[in-house]
Amino acid sequence: NAGVTQTPKFQVLKTGQSMTLQCAQDMNHEYMSWYRQDPGMGLRLIHYSVGAGITDQGEVPNGYNVSRSTTEDFPLRLLSAAPSQTSVYFCASSSPGQGLNTEAFFGQGTRLTVV
Amino acid sequence: RKEVEQDPGPFNVPEGATVAFNCTYSNSASQSFFWYRQDCRKEPKLLMSVYSSGNEDGRFTAQLNRASQYISLLIRDSKLSDSATYLCVVTAWPGTASKLTFGTGTRLQVTL
């Protein structure tokens, strides 16, 4: 089972460049999220989606855009990369209504460096 | 103040030891609680959900104290393979694993 697939795994960008981090899940999960992980900060929520066509901002949304045209895909766009966006990005998916046994499944991460 | 606080460690323990991690959260509206495990340079994976009554999964025991807004994880008979970072995670969305708030993690190193 593929689960949550993120591409690319590594990326180096120059300041001001734009790019899209791809995330796809094959579990038919309604909920998808993007997090960034920085040393000493833990994972922080960038954007999330509760279904196709519905997105909302998380804790650190500035500089990022998302869209959710299908259940499977949730791309994250960096509009104009800045060195402060150097981080490890994780996409996650989950299904609502699972009660206490609910689980978020994470992709393998994208390591982004902005120079 | 961080919404979820953890001691970053590292905790260095010998194989077979018992080790306990603590976590406090500040949002009293938090509804669901988890411990995730993250190996070096890998993605987080669910270790266990935390129930109000406390729960056990093999060598792992999790406790929740809603009044004190405190979560704990106890690992008994530590194995070398338990070496990882343990993330305390909460969400205010009941019954979901979305909109998660993470602690910075506690690093465990189990040695021979």
Image (cartoon, grey):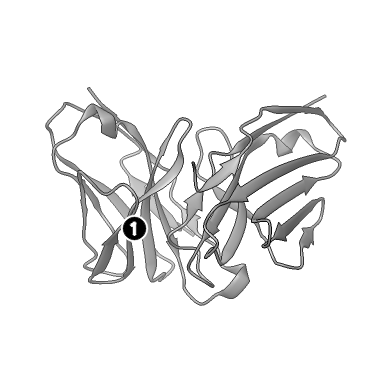
Q: Quadrant of residue A55?
A: bottom left
Position above or below: B112 against A103 = above
Q: Position of residue B49 (x, y in %)?
A: 65, 61
Callout 1: SS: strand
Residue A109 located left or right of residue A69: right
Residue B3 percent across, percent down from the top left: 50, 48
Give above or below for B86 relative to B30: above
Tell me if mark 1 has few (under 14), some (14-19) or many (20+) residues whose alpha carbon lies within 10 angstroms of its own. Answer: many
Q: Position of residue A65 (x, y in %)?
A: 20, 52
**Corner quadrant of residue A84:** top left
Closer to the camera in the image, A2 or A50: A50
How many marks do you count on the picture? Answer: 1
Q: Residue at x 48, y 52 (%)?
A: B101
Furthest residue in direction bottom, as rendered: A97
Residue ID at (28%, 59%): A74
Q: Is residue A103 left or right of residue B66?
A: left
In the depicted structure, whether residue B60 falls above or below residue A11: below
Which residue is drawn at the image coordinates 74% and 57% (left, top)?
B63
User: Callout 1, which amino acid?
Assistant: Ala
Q: Which of the image's four quarters has the C terminus of chain B?
A: top right
The residue sitting at 54% across, 44% down in the picture is: B103
Taking the image as drawn, is residue B36 in sight?
no
* Residue A85 visible from this viewpoint: yes
The image shows residue A82 at horizontal and vertical percentages of 20, 31
Disc 1 designates what residue? Answer: A24
